[in-house]
Amino acid sequence: MIIPHKCILQTSSTNASLIPTSSAIANIPTAAVSSISNQDYPTYTILGQSQYQACYPSSSFGVTGQTNSDAENTTLAAATYQTEKPSVMVPAAAAPRLSSDPSPSPSLTQTTPSKDADDQSRKNMTGKNRGKRKADASSSQDSELERVFLWDLDETIIIFHSLLTGSYAQKYGKDPTVVIGSGLTMEEMIFEVADTHLFFNDLEECDQVHVEDVASDDNGQDLSNYSFSTDGFSGSGGSGSHGSSVGVQGGVDWMRKLAFRYRKVREIYDKHKSNVGGLLSPQRKEALQRLRAEIEVLTDSWLGTALKSLLLIQSRKNCVNVLITTTQLVPALAKVLLYGLGEIFPIENIYSATKIGKESCFERIVSRFGKKVTYVVIGDGRDEEIAAKQHNMPFWRITNHGDLVSLHQALELDFL
């Protein structure tokens, strides 16, 4: 059952039909650039993805890349898992908006439905966070970086929004009752983790772009015996202030307690990034294993295919994966943990564009890693494509399994 006061976790994007890239990616041989097609942004040189698809048949793709630190991840490879239809009826409001196309072929060129209207409603958040912004954390290896891959989450690395709307079921000829039911069950788990362990009830109206954004208000107090439930903090309400002992919302005391919560969120994420099962009861852990295996079957190993590229990038000493999502930060962290991506994306490499948009997020990331680094944007949506263009970054569009396979092939051939 969905928690009614929560917004649906999704990204806002509308797909186009092009995959612009740049000669800045690598020294690509002339022969590799097979053709130049019509494009929205003529300033880009296009490296057609179709040249790789001939290497891969349109059948389902095996999962070879998996995170090996989370015990429950081993179930993702269980292709013989028998899904059970959950007792969830197809919501009338979730009618798919795509014409039916049962073929799972990588050559599909249909675009996913527009999610701009849904995203806009989530961006109307209360803006009461006036703490000083602390510079984003950076590792000692940042100076050695040559390439930063900026990833979208929903419909790029994982399939989530289109499960809830039923559009994935329609596009690939799946049972909509099973697909939507799986999406709703995962959404419930995301909010369960976010509310129970990551203070989302307190932080829903105090959303941040990055986990360190209010760190400058943290006085470093030992939180070992700190009681978050009785400190009087309240992040909800539209009045902007409270008469309780917590003081004025946005005041020094209030900001300090807000910073405490984000510090604790970071500690919990770091502790459980390779073992989200430690946050769950044995029954819920088992349910998560089944659900992830079921979604992997329903989506024809979409996550497993994306993991091949993520793990290849992670294996390079001079490259890094960064996540930018229009999901609010705390639910996004819960998503990443529940999908087993915590080892791929350290919490300092996760940004929420809910408040400021992806273009502003890109600006922050460029400020952090510098302009000498080559940035590659990977996503399914119009917002990240436009943001990539504004920053003169190559953009790789993901619309189907074939795009993920072609991405991995390009990475293997050192084109990216």
Image (cartoon, helix red, strand yellow):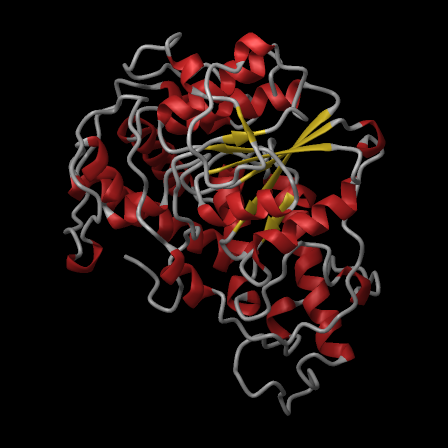
Q: Give the side of residue 60 with respect to residue 334, left or right.
A: left
In this rendering, is residue 291 above or below 263? Answer: above
In x, y percent, where is residue 191? Answer: 43, 55
Q: Is residue 83 above or below residue 125?
A: above
Q: Is residue 137 visible?
A: no
Residue beneath the point at 62% across and 74% down: 230
**Quarter of the image containing the N terminus?**
bottom left
Please state the horizontal and vertical placement of residue 84, each as a whole percent of the image. 19, 34
Residue 159 picture quarter: top left
Q: Is residue 63 or residue 97 the one in the foreground? A: 97
Residue located at (15% from left, 58% from top): 92
Query: In the rendered view, does 222 fall on the left or right side of 388?
Result: right
Q: Between 396 and 291, which is closer to the camera in this rendering?
A: 396
Report how many numbered discs are placed on residues in the image: 0
Q: Quadrant of the C terminus?
A: top right
Q: Quadrant of residue 346?
A: top right
Query: Is residue 331 in sight in this rendering?
Result: yes
Q: Who's the residue at 36% across and 52% down the image?
A: 188
Q: Which residue is located at x 35 percent, y 62 percent?
A: 3
